[in-house]
Amino acid sequence: MTGDTHYDLEILAELAEGLLDAATALQVREHLAICDPCGESLADLAAVREVLSATPTPAMPMGVALRIDRALAAEAESFRGGGVGLVEAPAWDDIMRDAPWETEPAPLPEPEPVTRLGVVGDDGTVVPVTPVRRRRTGARRRWALPAAAAGVAAAVIGATVVTTSMLSASGPGADPPMTLPLLAEGSKYQLTESNWNYTDQALRGSMLDYIGPMDATGTVRSSKLDQCVNRLTAEVGTAPFAVDQGFYNGQEANIMVFWHNQPKNQVLVHVVGPECDEVRKPGFARWK
Amino acid sequence: MNSPPEPPPAAEQQAARAVVSDADLLTRHIAGDPHAFSEIVKRHRDRMWAVALRTLGDPDEAADAVQDAFVSAYRKAESFRGEAAVTTWLHRIVVNACLDRMRRKSVRPVADDELIEAAERETPVPDQTAEREVSMEVSSALRLLPADQRAALVLVDMMGYSVEDAAHVLQVPSGTVKSRCARGRAKLVPILSHLRNRSDLSRVSSAKGAELRDG
């Protein structure tokens, strides 16, 4: 094809993509060698690619990201009791992500044996298996709270949570178990194991109803839990005065109760998973 | 889908804890880990957003589509087959959500002021006027294409994925992706040709043209 006939853009675009059969491709190339307008068209096609690839792709706006987190949280709610997503998705992670006082999030739990997570069905799909309770029974002991502990906790009355967090969090990159002060020998917290399955509603009400009064049978706690308490102590700026081992929305969890304002009966409740990962946005509740 | 030309900026920040693969996270999600899916979302939301925004050309529509897609992925995580990468699977869900929306609102006429408004929301940085203008024109030009050509061009030319990756996402043969791209580009030439003069693209494309011409 020579002279005043030209190939259309679609044929040229197909040539560029290698879609033409060998004979046609050769024919078009021979034409291109002598036809400037068709050469221009080919260059225009390449320019379109360049323009498209040079168009900036903006990051997802924060508002959209939060909206998605909320939608997923709602989805988790509606799936409660089912096989997937038993706990509210923590949108507050995103809200606080860029806050200067935000420390590195807790590391994800170690990978677990495949057999516990799911089995591969005949058709290749992964079928979930009900998570196995992992808590060692050895750690389920009770601890008597010495009178001194109440005093330690009471010393921080009036300090707001944000202020204490800012003072105690040393910034991202700190390795909590190594750099944060260990819980002083004298500051003990009451450890109970109610095995209560807490809901958000329960965690806004009276904690004493669930955790119960301090009882007298005390013994050693697991060092893992102590480490977790130390981390939270550093984060919150005060030690919890009560820790209850139970469940949160069906997932194993430790409910840690900190005094926020003791005369006003206000407590701050942190809910952490077995790996010390916060599974719920810290919230306020009443003690009595 | 392992080799996008430029990883999203968030990927670097997360490199430290990216030791857990997407597939592992998905498995954990299925097993009931409440944080696993959030992590997947964090890792990929910027790319999903870019795909949806470019495919639909409207931030509000894109937000709806990405949200639908993530919720849908959350629900059908168990149907994920290990043979594809998690990212491919996610892209597929997002692209399908976009195509669904486009079909439902097929050939919706777009007012100019709407386009301007949309483009302003996309790129709020004030001193990138030229970039914004290009972005706006590209968005409105893409809208003139049939949905399948648009989706192919977004993945291959805009997101920089290989034809093979795009074919996996769109679940069509590679040849089909190539031909959709070719036809789409051919349609865009008259609409976008004026943009060429603004940048230093002509030299690059002539070289490319010469290369093709000479076989």
Image: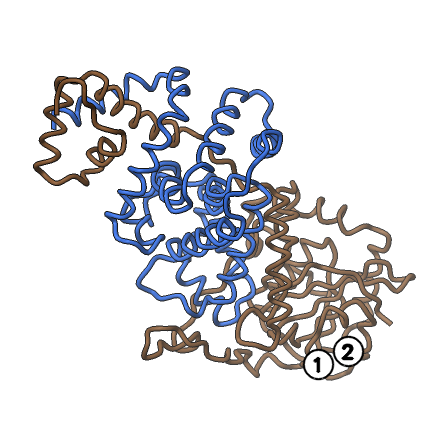
Chain colours: A brown, B blue
- Residue shown at the point (21%, 27%) measured from the top left: A7
Which residue is disc 1 drawn over?
A194
Q: Chain of mark 2?
A: A
B11 lies above or below A142:
above
Query: Mark 1 near mark 2, Cβ–Cβ under 8 Å?
Result: yes
The amino acid at mark 2 is: Tyr
User: Which label is found at residue A210?
Assistant: 2
- Residue shown at the point (63%, 51%) measured from the top left: A67
Position in image of residue A44 (x %, y %) = 30, 23
In the rendered image, the residue lying farthest to the right is A263
- Residue shown at the point (71%, 49%) measured from the top left: A165
Position in image of residue B167 (x %, y %) = 30, 51
Cα separation between marks 1 and 2: 7 Å
The quadrant in which the C terminus of chain A is found is bottom right
Q: Chain of mark 1?
A: A
Secondary structure at badge 1 equals loop
The amino acid at mark 1 is: Ser
- Packing grade of label 2 (10 A; few <14, some 14-19, many >=20) is some
